């Protein structure tokens, strides 16, 4: 009976997910990406609870601001190299292995350089940041030490991007698991014996473990595709930095300041911090709803990059609509649930949040729109039109800031509405580009 069931499962698998098909690649990648994300977040959650209990509220808060500072500088250190590696390794790993090798080498070198420069800046600024910005002079040395996190984070970002380009999502999940298993006792021991200093040093050690595991994994993937990272000729691909990495970096770096400015407008209104609390509560659902579409995006981008690189317009279009449809199905049920029970959900957060039902509805609408828009944005990414993507994102930022300025008198609802309007405008531009680009590619294929 078990054997018969196994045969039936294999039959269904071959019928719906034939080996090598786009559906099979997406299903495999999505499964392992989800496993990797769950492993990483799960281990992080468990360790954070233990570390918080050992450090206490003040110590854990200090660790949080150190990590936040490193994260802010990390945007600049990363320089969009993870995205660059993903796009070009996926496109050229089979078509032009030599070029893929040069891209991997160049990304590693630039990550080393940019990570080193930004880490040096953090080292030089650490006394000023600790004293003037954070009002905690005693954190100066820890900020200096945390530059190691910044440096390794930049390199690891480029490595993970390359692994994504290889569609090595199972390998990424295994790396996350091994890294978590090794890092967990390291972090607990560091905090137990050396408190906050031990936590920072242990995090650096964990990042180094991740670097070693990533390096081993990349070497295996390169051998599989007969790719040799060529550091001597890697600088031949320098134009990629201007064409792709720089606009990718600028697009990513823009989101934080724009969001912060709009949030700052809200908290400067009467009862602003209470309204900010309502918006933050509703925004938890925004982040949760976009988790699975984000996983899908990680999987689809390398496949789409490869297909567009092969001028495979038919499968590229199929992949686009499949992803839009899948994201729509994933998010529709949750959005409807939120619409029906918006008041109950906000009441759950406690007294003072009950007035945020309308804000939650607008936030859910925004998440739903963004979920079906992400695959279209992936076309811009996979086609390498990153300067156009930057201009579109610049428009999003302008509309978001302008809309917030006009609507902020309505509190959290005004902020949420301004963001929705910004994403509606953004969606129009991205859908327009995707339709034009795919039609153009189809004509080029027909008349080639």
Image (spheres, rainbow, N blue to C red):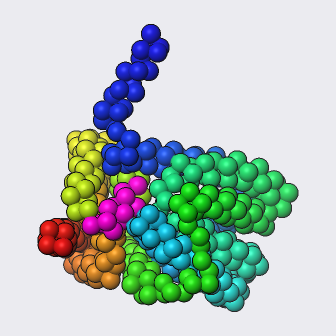
Figure check: 280 above or below 240:
above
Q: Quadrant of residue 157?
A: bottom right
| Residue 220 visible in the shown view | yes
Figure check: 305 above or below 11:
below
Q: Nearer the viewer, residue 366 or 39?
A: 39
Q: Nearer the viewer, residue 418 or 169?
A: 169
* Residue 305 magenta: yes
**Residue at the spot x=70%, y=62% of the render?**
212
* Residue 219 magenta: no
Q: Nearer the viewer, residue 187 or 243?
A: 243
Q: Quadrant of the C terminus?
A: bottom left
Q: Where is residue 19? Give x, y as percent.
A: 38, 41
**Residue at the spot x=80%, y=58% of the render?**
190
Q: Quadrant of residue 401?
A: bottom left
Q: Where is residue 239? Give x, y as percent.
A: 44, 87
Please give the range of residues in magenta.
299-311
Q: Quadrant of the N terminus?
A: top left
Q: Secondary structure of the magenta portion, mostly? A: helix
Figure check: 178 above or below 262:
above
| Residue 199 visible in the shown view | no
| Left or right: 244 as drawn, with respect to 368 | right
**Residue at the spot x=24%, y=68% of the render?**
423
């Amino acid at each position: 009976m078990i054997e018969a069931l196994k045969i039936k499962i294999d039959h269904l698998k071959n019928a719906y997910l034939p080996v090598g098909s786009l559906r099979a690649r997406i299903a495999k990648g999505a499964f392992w990406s989800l496993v990797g994300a769950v492993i990483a977040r799960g281990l992080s959650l468990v360790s954070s609870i233990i570390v918080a209990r050992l450090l206490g509220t003040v110590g854990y808060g200090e660790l949080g601001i150190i990590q936040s500072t490193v994260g802010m500088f990390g945007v600049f250190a990363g320089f969009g190299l993870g995205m660059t590696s993903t796009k070009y390794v996926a496109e050229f790993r089979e078509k032009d292995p030599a070029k893929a090798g040069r891209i991997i080498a160049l990304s590693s070198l630039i990550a080393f350089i940019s990570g080193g420069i930004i880490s040096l800046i953090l080292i030089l600024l650490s006394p000023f940041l600790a004293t003037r910005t954070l009002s905690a002079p005693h954190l100066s040395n820890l900020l200096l030490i945390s530059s190691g996190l910044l440096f390794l984070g930049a390199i690891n970002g480029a490595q993970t991007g390359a692994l994504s380009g290889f569609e090595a999502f199972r390998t990424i999940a295994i790396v996350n698991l091994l890294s978590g298993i090794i890092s967990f006792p390291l972090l607990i021991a560091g905090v137990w014996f050396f408190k906050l200093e031990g936590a920072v040093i242990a995090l650096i050690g964990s990042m180094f473990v991740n670097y070693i595991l990533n390096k081993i994994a990349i070497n295996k993937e390169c051998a599989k595709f007969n790719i040799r990272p060529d550091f001597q000729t890697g600088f031949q691909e320098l134009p990629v930095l201007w064409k792709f990495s720089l606009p990718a970096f600028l697009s990513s770096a823009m989101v934080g300041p724009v969001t912060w400015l709009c949030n700052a407008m809200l908290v400067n209104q009467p009862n602003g911090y209470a309204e900010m609390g309502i918006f933050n509560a509703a925004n938890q659902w925004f982040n949760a709803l976009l988790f699975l579409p984000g996983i899908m995006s990680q999987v689809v981008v390398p496949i789409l990059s490869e297909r567009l690189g092969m001028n495979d317009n038919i499968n590229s279009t199929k992949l686009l609509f499949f992803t839009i449809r899948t994201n729509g199905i994933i998010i529709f049920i949750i959005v409807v649930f939120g619409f029906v029970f918006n008041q109950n959900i906000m009441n759950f957060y406690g007294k003072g949040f009950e007035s945020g039902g309308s804000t939650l509805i607008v936030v859910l609408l925004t998440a739903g729109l963004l979920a079906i828009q992400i695959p279209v944005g992936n076309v811009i990414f996979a086609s390498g039109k990153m300067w156009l993507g930057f201009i579109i994102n610049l428009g999003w930022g302008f509309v978001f800031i302008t809309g917030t300025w006009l609507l902020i008198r309505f509190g959290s609802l005004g902020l949420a509405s301004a963001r929705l309007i910004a994403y509606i405008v953004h969606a129009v531009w991205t859908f327009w580009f995707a339709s034009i680009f795919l039609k153009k590619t189809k004509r080029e294929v027909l008349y080639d």
